[in-house]
Amino acid sequence: MQRIIERVKQIVFKPRETWEVISTEEATVSELFINYLLILAAVPALASFLGRWIIGIRIPFVGVYRFSFGASLLNAVLDYILTVAGVWVLGKIIYLLAQNFGSTRDELRAFK
């Protein structure tokens, strides 16, 4: 987990140098999904779960509505699945459009 936190910090504070390092790393698409995406996608899903269940959402002129545990959990699971699926689709789109932007088709680079 510490490795992921350090990588996120590096991307935020030193993006150019970090992306150069990332581009030279050997990995597979499945390794990227397992080692990064599945873990990082859980962060907003967990925040959504806690926010809806404990804090609730503000509805104008009505007040705060707190979702039940089950509804919050279902929403978080759907958020997680859609995030993972969205990243996969976006990677495929980048892969398919690479030649249109003067690059070569490389699935690993597209997902990175």
Image (cartoon, grey):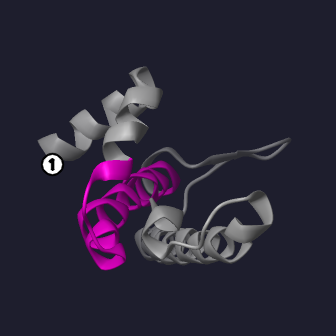
Q: Which residue lies furthest to the right in this view?
A: 61
Q: What residue type is labelled 1?
A: Met
> 55 or 47: nearer the eye?
47
* Residue 14, x across and y down, in percent: 40, 23
Q: Name the residue under label 1.
A: 1
Q: Is residue 33 magenta?
A: yes
Q: Based on the picture, tell me whether residue 104 belongs to the magenta stretch.
A: no
Please give the name of the residue rendered at 76% of the width and 59% of the height, measured from the top-left corner.
101
Residue at (31, 50) in percent of width and height: 24
Task: Give me the residue at 16% from left, 43% from top.
Answer: 3
- The picture quadrant where one finds residue 64 is top right
User: Could you tell me what secondary structure mostly forms the magenta stretch?
Assistant: helix
**Residue 102, position as x, y percentages in the image:** 73, 59
Foreground: 31 or 39? Answer: 31
Disc 1: CA contacts within 10 A as few (<14), some (14-19) or many (>=20): few
Q: Quadrant of residue 97?
A: bottom right
Q: x, y (%) of residue 110?
A: 53, 65
In the displayed structure image, the side of residue 1 where residue 95 appears, left or right? right
The vertical placement of 67 against 74, above or below, is: above
Residue range (magenta) = 23-52
**Residue 31 rendering spot, x and y as whole percentages:** 26, 72
